[in-house]
Image: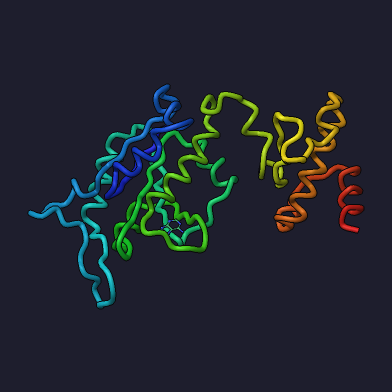
Amino acid sequence: MNFHVLTLFPEMIEQGLNTSIIGRALEKELLTLQTVNIRDFAENKHNRVDDYPYGGGAGMVMAPGPVYRAFQHVKDQIISKKPRVIYLTPQGQVFNQNLAEEFAKEEDLVFLCGHYEGIDERALELIVTDNVSLGDYVLTGGELAAMVVIDAISRLVPGVLNNDTSAEFESFQDNLLEYPQYTRPEEFMGKKVPEVLLSGHHAKIDAWRREQSIIRTVNQRPDLLEKAVLNKKEKKFLEEYRN
Ligand code: ADE
């Protein structure tokens, strides 16, 4: 997977992604990360990339030229078919695990990070294929959002997580939240690890974990439950729990 990020703050992206699991995957070249400074594509004396909005109003708008040229620079290096270009914006489709899985299938992904009051609409029309939002709140720029999206995609790339199966068995994969986890000590501040986990009885442990996932989802994300696939026994458990 090759990530290309168009940004006014390349160091923010590089520093944010060069640690921990993603950092290691970059080192191993399971992932590559190219940051492109949009300012390098300004064609004026002071390298200005923003200007006043036509029609007036508060704030500044990122001019189309530098953004468009920065994209062409990246596109010229991509050999694969036309890349998907993801613009991070609160006006986009809300990001989720399904979208992460869809993006993870691509060979190259281009991210466009805006600042100020946004980017000239014409540049967006010319280059963007996907508008993606993290949620209903406004960030100061697209960089943190791009990093969140890149992180979620990266862990789906084969080899990035040490344990090949660990990306499968967790929250959202089947629309249930993850069950609670425990490690040593067996008792902490008077609170004991659930007995069943010490039993060594794997079928019982699996059943208990599924039940805990169901309980959590009912209480914390009931909206997810509609899409969850439960077997007969689990449906019965859910009914009894609700009563
Ligand atoms: N840029 C500013 N706010 C954002 C948000 N909520 N999601 C994605 N990109 C953004």
Ligand 1 falls in which quarter? bottom left
Q: Position of residue 83 (x, y in %)?
A: 39, 41
Q: Nearer the viewer, residue 209 or 154?
A: 209
Residue 239 position within the rendered picture, expressed as x and y whole percent measured from the top left = 89, 54
Q: Quadrant of residue 140?
A: bottom left
Q: How many marks can you see?
A: 0
Q: Residue at x 84, y 23 (%)?
A: 200
Q: Quadrant of the C terminus?
A: bottom right
Q: Is residue 189 above or below residue 55?
A: above
Tell me the colour scheme of the image.
Answer: rainbow
Which residue is painted at 18% across and 46% down in the image?
A: 40
Residue 204 pos. (x, y %): 87, 31
Instruction: Identify the residue at image location x=41%, y=54%.
Output: 88
From the viewer's perspective, tell me whether residue 185 is left or right of residue 163: right
| Viewer-proximal residue among 48 and 211 | 211
Question: Viewed as shown, does residue 5 lie left or right of 1?
Answer: left
Name the outermost residue toward the left. 45
- Quarter of the figure with residue 26: top left
Residue 180: percent from the left, percent from the top?
72, 40
Residue at point 42%, 58% (across, down): 89
The N terminus, quarter of image: top left
Q: Residue furthest top?
A: 28
